Amino acid sequence: MAYKDRILSPQQLKKLSEHKYSCTNSSLMDPWLQPWWNWLVSKTPLWLAPNLITIVGLAVNIITTLILVAYAPEGTAPPPRWTCLLCAIGLFIYQSLDSIDGKQARRTNTSSPLGELFDHGCDSISTVFVALSACISCQLGHYPNWLFFQCFCAIGLFYCAHWQTYVSGTLRFGKIDVTEAQFTIIGIHMISFFFGPEIWMTKLPIIGYNKNNIILFGITICYFVNFVNFCKMFLQGGSGKNGSSVAGTSVLSPSIPLTLVVLPAFIIAQKSPENIFTEHSALYIIAFGMVAAKVTNKLVIAHMTKAEMEYLDWSLLGPGLLFLNQYFNCVVPEIWLLWFTLIWGTQDLVRYCSQVCLEICAHLNIQLFTIPYPPKGVKAQTSSKGGHQQQQQSGGGASSASSAKTKNVQTVNQGTNPPVKHKKKTNNSTNNHLWEAKDDLNGL
């Protein structure tokens, strides 16, 4: 649990180098969005690093959400319409950039395990802000228990998706998954912009329920379906020895870190004499969301390095102090400790992620936010074309056979390893869907 000079051991770095990304996807919307993503990445400069694309999208999403939070921090007052529009635009930008970072990595021959890790890390943070913005736009602050349930379900299910990956070795996306959820939330923000956030508090005829109750019921059903699909994993067993996880540990072991985040968050919110969650909903969710993002990142690293996950973590210091403070009848104002939880959890998350990224960059001999330009693949193609033209001009008869052979060879950058030549495979529609369906998780 103590801070270490190095987070990843040499064995973990070796396993990380050997890691192969595995994903299955049956999303309903992804095939329809592929033309947009392909066009967008074709307009992206070749010097732009995929990780830089990811982090810019995350920054836009966080900034637009914080503007919304500033106008309605408790989720009860209707925020200005323009803030809802801003959130919709910010989420669309994030979703689009998050979907092309993998395409840009393959386009520039800079794919590596670091990109997958970086993408998942940004997604773990984004999930907190996306869920919170949707709840504020619907004014769920009027129903504190529902607000808590919706936000922590979103955080928990994202963790469960990587828990399932840790057990089976493959990340699975269902028919209604992250892309569908993101565009549903964009739709919620757009309704709030066009008709005003107050529309969610008006009652439906005949039924008599507020319109935001319909959103609650619909999202809850989707949560339940995803949770049932997740539970099927335990019946199938893990991909490790004797049905264990990829690291050879129990398939139930990742439940401990998640419980240490969600359970204290629930108890503190329910037992607070100062109604800390009701009075400071957004601050509370973001603070615990940063703690959850930290343990999710540790789970992703455990999967990619096939290592056992550590249960205790320094990010749990803030929730622990809040819990002990309630036990001793709140000798310290809870709002002080809540701000401490946010600041401590954020710096701990940033420090951890930064150190892990730097260690991986040093091991793979790559940069985090810059890439070689022009890309190595482009250089090879250019030199090949130039040599072919010169041979044609000089009338060399062997040039045709040489260039034909070159066209069937692709140079792939493998980090610290020397370039390796592989024969190109014919892309059929099935393989194309498998690789392209979820490009946002196959980053730099």
Image (cartoon, helix red, strand yellow):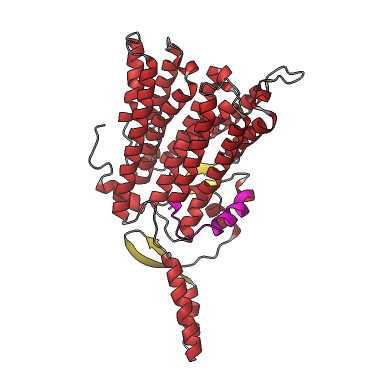
Q: In the displayed structure, would residue 291 be above or below residue 36?
A: above
Could you tell me residue 84's position as x and y percent?
60, 33
Direction from residue 3 to residue 54 in the image, left or right: right
Q: In the displayed structure, would residue 237 be above or below residue 441?
A: above
**Residue depicted at 41% across the width and 34% down the height:** 293
Quarter of the image for the N terminus: give it.
top left
**Residue depicted at 47% across the width and 85% down the height:** 390
**Residue depicted at 39% across the width and 21% down the height:** 338
Could you tell me residue 429's position as x and y percent?
60, 58
Direction from residue 289 to residue 85 in the image, left or right: right
Could you tell me residue 183's position as x and y percent?
61, 39
- Name the one closer to the observer, 198 or 127: 198
Range of magenta residues: 33-51
Q: Is residue 354 magenta?
A: no
Q: In the displayed structure, would residue 39 be above or below residue 425?
A: above
Q: Quadrant of residue 221?
A: top right
Query: How many labels sit on residues?
Result: 0
